[in-house]
Amino acid sequence: MTIIWVCQLKSLLLLYCTLGVSGYKLNADNEIKDEVHPGVSTEWGNQTAVREFVLLGFRNISEIQVLLFPVFLAIYILTMVGNILILVLIVVDHHLHTPMYFFLGNLSCLETCYTSSILPRMLASFVTGDETISFSGCFTQYFFFGLLSGTECYLLAAMSYDRYLAICKPLHYASLMNGRFCLQLAAMSWTSSFLAISITILLMLNLTFCGPNEMDHFFCDFIPIVKLSCSDTFMLEVVAAILLPLWTFPPFLLTMTSYICIIATILKISSTTKRQKAFSTCSSHLTVVTIFYGTVFIVYMVPKKDTLRDLDKAFSFFYTVLTPLINPFIYSLRNKEVKEALTKVVAKFCVVKETQTSLCSCFQCK
């Protein structure tokens, strides 16, 4: 008898769970009622009710929608060209084969992937008018976004530690910041970020989405995704609240500590010329760190009041799209070594072009 009751109870629980996650409800006559939402699957027993999400993007500024496509296309092209150029210069010029430029090369590679994970889908949306993104596509985009943004935190920390050793420990710099240690720091940056985002994604995949499916953002981010879930997100939010400080605060604290020591050391230098030279070696990186962490903290750490909630999308656009665009210009325009390497590459290219032209003219004469 007990076994029969247990079996019946299991059947009722299974039916309840199936009805709950699939978007079905019982009406007053205890009949199954199917609630249909746009982009929501109504297949019986389907654990994921939502088939796709709708990214509203910048729909609220419809008066300039026509201008957005050429502007974003120009931003994407400049970002790709700038970061790839920095990467090529570091590989080609042996004078840039130093720890600082090794990390800068990693950062340029990261920024290229970072932009490519967000902007191409936006550009396609402007052309086709299709604002939807599949369930798997949304989580894939968030995975790469989380992986790359977390890695950037650690790479910026590694670059700040490199500047700390160069300015505060110049005699020990070569022995401490060797090639093997640089590879270890870069590998740790990518691995730690991969582990953190993988745990988050695995927990998020257990969420149930049964509509609505409209996301007021231009890419798939943690908070907009969780808001759309119709299942209990308490455990996920607790894990995220634990992972976020462990993920971001150590590199942030290392960056801040390094620059406090750097500024204190620079202020002790008596010579104005030497002081300016020492500060110029880290001013570009300090600018990038300030822009990146400033916008990230506004988006994720500041309490969500009505005035700031409207600006979240703008600040998110700044650190996901504009920061990768301006980084190459900051490092090239304020860095003498990069400018010299660029001049050499351009000069070599011009020489090769002139040689090819002269050879072609000689063959034509013959």
Image: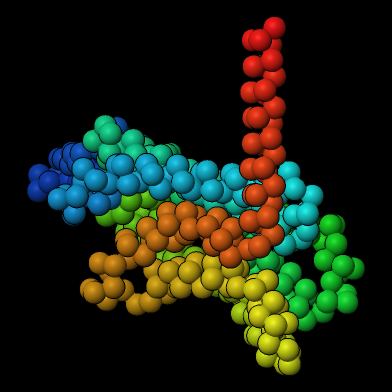
The residue sitting at 37% across, 58% down in the picture is 317
- Horizontal placement of 127 versus 284: left or right? left
Q: Position of residue 191 (x, y in %)?
A: 68, 54
- Horizontal placement of 10 versus 340: left or right? left
> Residue 182 falls in which quadrant of the image?
bottom right
* Residue sitting at the far left: 28
Q: Position of residue 96 (x, y in %)?
A: 75, 54
The residue sitting at 64% across, 16% down in the picture is 361
> From what the image shows, is residue 303 above or below residue 110?
below
Q: From this viewpoint, is residue 150 visible? A: no
> From what the image shows, is residue 149 above or below residue 143?
below
Q: Quadrant of the C terminus?
A: top right
* Residue sitting at the far top: 366
> From what the image shows, is residue 21 above or below residue 39?
below
- Horizontal placement of 341 versus 245: left or right? right
The residue sitting at 23% across, 35% down in the picture is 129
Q: Position of residue 71 (x, y in %)?
A: 32, 47
- Horizontal placement of 325 versus 93: left or right? left
Q: Out of 359 and 166, give the one closest to the viewer.
A: 359
Q: Out of 156 and 346, give the one closest to the viewer.
A: 346
Q: Position of residue 223 (x, y in %)?
A: 37, 61
